[in-house]
Amino acid sequence: MPTFSVIIPTYGRPDQLQTCLDTLVDVEPPSEGFEVVVVDDGTPEPVEPQLKPWLDRLSLTVLRQENSGPGPARNLGLASARGRFIAFTDDDCLIDPGWLQALEAAFIRHPDAMLGGRTVQQPGDPYSEANQLIGDAVHRFYNESGHGARFFPSNNLAVPAELLRDAGGFHPDFFPHASEDRELCDRWHHLGHDLVYVPEAHLIHARQATFRRFWRQHFTYGRGAHHYHHLRAHRGSGQLRNDAVFHRRLPTMLRQPLAQLPLKRRTQALVLLGVWQVANAAGYFKERLTAWRPHES
């Protein structure tokens, strides 16, 4: 049994996936080693033949499913994983060599907790900078309140395998939307488990962005947020008004990091932050108007 199973869902990004696997080759192994489980989420051209060079460099398993979204893909990987702990990342992430050893050290102190690492957007364009500002604000709000962490994105997330299976894995009804990681974190906390931030477990998110992709990303998050709040209210773990505090505090949380940017970059960031809010709200109210409801778990 390896210490970790690293699960990577993928769809239509073979070059980025291969770069991600290259960084995993250089990861310093935990005490009992690790395996990598890539789940091809129905890519029109299957990725497995393209990954043969990594079969000799990693303990690699490639699974395939019909296109169902990253949540079900992660669940399929979980079903076949042999590791004591599961570490999730995405196919467009670059893994730091010390990632798994940092997570293992944290699990020694918190063996039943969900762990979240530090994710940094790859610099180079205004969209990455805006996403970094958003991610830092979200982290500050949910994880630095003094009452314990509450949310980690699924691209840098680690969980004890059996506890995750007992909790039901990722909710299957978020595709083609997003926010299944928010729902899992909320359910994990509702079940009485801890969430612990591990900044030493860091990686780079090398998202390839354009204005259209940026808009679609946050519109999709807004649509998923509607499903998240519906499920959350159903199980009694929170209500929408609890999260409204985030938006009231947002200007204060963004003031200092924006002030540190040069004028041109600050202006670009302010425009994209406005686009983020509009796209997120548009996605949320689209779902509210269509009154779609997922089945309950």
Image (tube, rainbow, N blue to C red):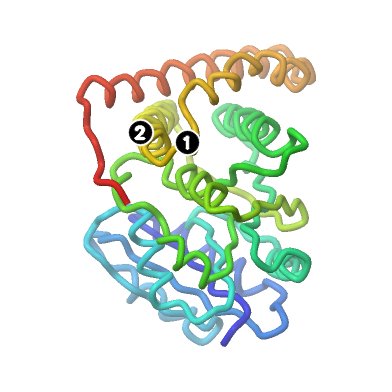
Circle 1 residues within 10 Å: few <14, some 14–19, many ≥20: some
Residue 42 got which mark?
A: none
Report how far apart the C-alphas of labels 1 and 2 lie in the structure.
30 Å
Residue topped by disc 2:
230
In the image, what residue type sits under mark 1?
Ala
Please provide percent x and percent y for residue 99. Answer: 70, 64
Going 50% across and 20% down the picture, which residue do you hit? 241
- The image shows residue 166, relative to residue 1, as above or below, that is above
- Check disc 2: other Cα within 10 Å, few if <14, some if 14-19, many if 20+: many
Circles 1 and 2, Cβ within 8 Å, touching? The answer is: no
Q: Amino acid at mark 2?
A: His
Residue 195, given in percent of the width and then of the height, sits at 65, 51
At 79% from the left edge and 20% from the top edge, which residue is drawn? 260
Is residue 12 toward the left or the right of residue 105 in the image? Answer: left
Dividing the picture into quarters, in which one does residue 51 lie?
A: bottom left
Report the mark closest to the observer, 1 or 2: 2
Q: Residue at 66%, 17% (x, y): give it.
A: 249
Query: Percent position (x, y) of residue 215?
Result: 40, 26
Mark toward the start of the polypeptide (1 vs 2): 1
Residue 209's label in the rendered image is: 1
Q: Mark 1: which secondary structure?
A: loop
- Tell me the SS state at disc 2: helix
